[in-house]
Amino acid sequence: MIWDVALRKLLRHERATFEIDVRFASASPRVVLYGPSGAGKTQTLRMIAGITRPDAGRVAVAGRVLYDAAAHRSLSPQQRRLGYVFQDYALFPHLTVRQNIAFARRLGWRNPPRGIDDAAVDRWIGAFHLEGVAGHYPDQISGGQRQRTALARALVTEPAALLLDEPFAALDQALRRRLRLELKDLLAEVDLPMLLITHDDEDLSSLAEQVVHLHSGRVEATASTLLAAA
């Protein structure tokens, strides 16, 4: 089993409450959490990554237990070794493309120097064809280049799995199609499990092997992509 997730959390905002109770297990490397805005997809991803702490539950990825409330086990986000790409990419505006990628390789909060020499950083700059903009800042590059920078930063640490929060949402339709194909080829090349959240049907047909349908904080159904398309 690659993905084994059972998480529960009660969210409160003023007088409103929203309960997430998500449970799914899958042996498929590429799983998509699919559902409308407000279904609880991002909060579920953040709990898997260790950014948000659940009230109860368990998370195991590729047989490694990352969180188990009953056993009082909760690894830090760094210890979980999951590459996380935020919806808005969360690049540091004051760092260049090279520095943003290299930042993931450093302990603490000290910024890497502009001319940092790191073979792993060079590898992913080359893999995503970012050589020409490596010295540019995020506001000087295109949306597709920002996405590639965020992916390179997630992959440079050699994570155990990749978590993607609607990575194509901010891109135009033509660029979405091209980057979906690039991501699919990349995942096949590095043999890396992926958990992606989306409400876009095209993401399912392009990237999903297993689909977990979320609605109102709960799993409505799970299906292979063939069943989901039927």
Image (cartoon, rainbow, N blue to C red):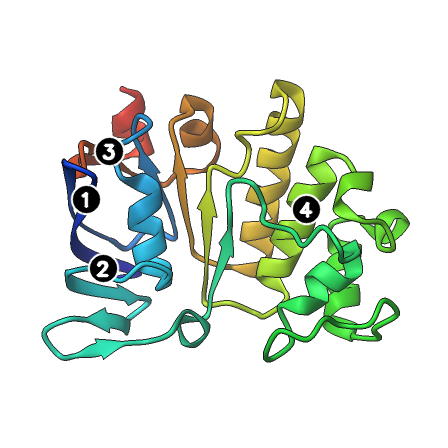
x, y percent for residue 142:
76, 35
Do the CB atoms of the residues marked 2 and 4 lie less than 8 Å apart? no
x, y percent for residue 186:
61, 50
Which residue position is annotated with label 4?
Answer: 148
Which residue position is annotated with label 3?
Answer: 213
Mark 3 or 1: in front is: 1
Q: Check disc 2 and give the amino acid type.
A: Asp
Give whichever of discs 3 and 2 has the lower sequence position.
2
Point out the image quarter for the C terminus. Answer: top left
* Distance from Cα at disc 4 to Cα at disc 3: 27 Å
The numbered dot on residue 116 is none
Q: Quadrant of residue 223?
A: top left
* Distance from Cα at disc 1 to Cα at disc 4: 35 Å
Give whichever of discs 1 and 2 has the lower sequence position.
2
* Distance from Cα at disc 3 to Cα at disc 1: 23 Å
Which residue position is annotated with label 2?
Answer: 4
Q: Judge the density around disc 3: few (<14), some (14-19), many (≥20) Cα neighbours within 10 Å.
A: many
Give whichever of discs 1 and 4 has the lower sequence position.
1
Q: Residue at x 16, y 79 (%)?
A: 72
**Whether residue 210 can be seen here:** no
> Does residue 44 appear to the left or right of 25 in the view shown?
right
Which residue position is annotated with label 1?
Answer: 12
Q: Check disc 3 and give the amino acid type.
A: His
State whether residue 65 is above or below residue 154.
below
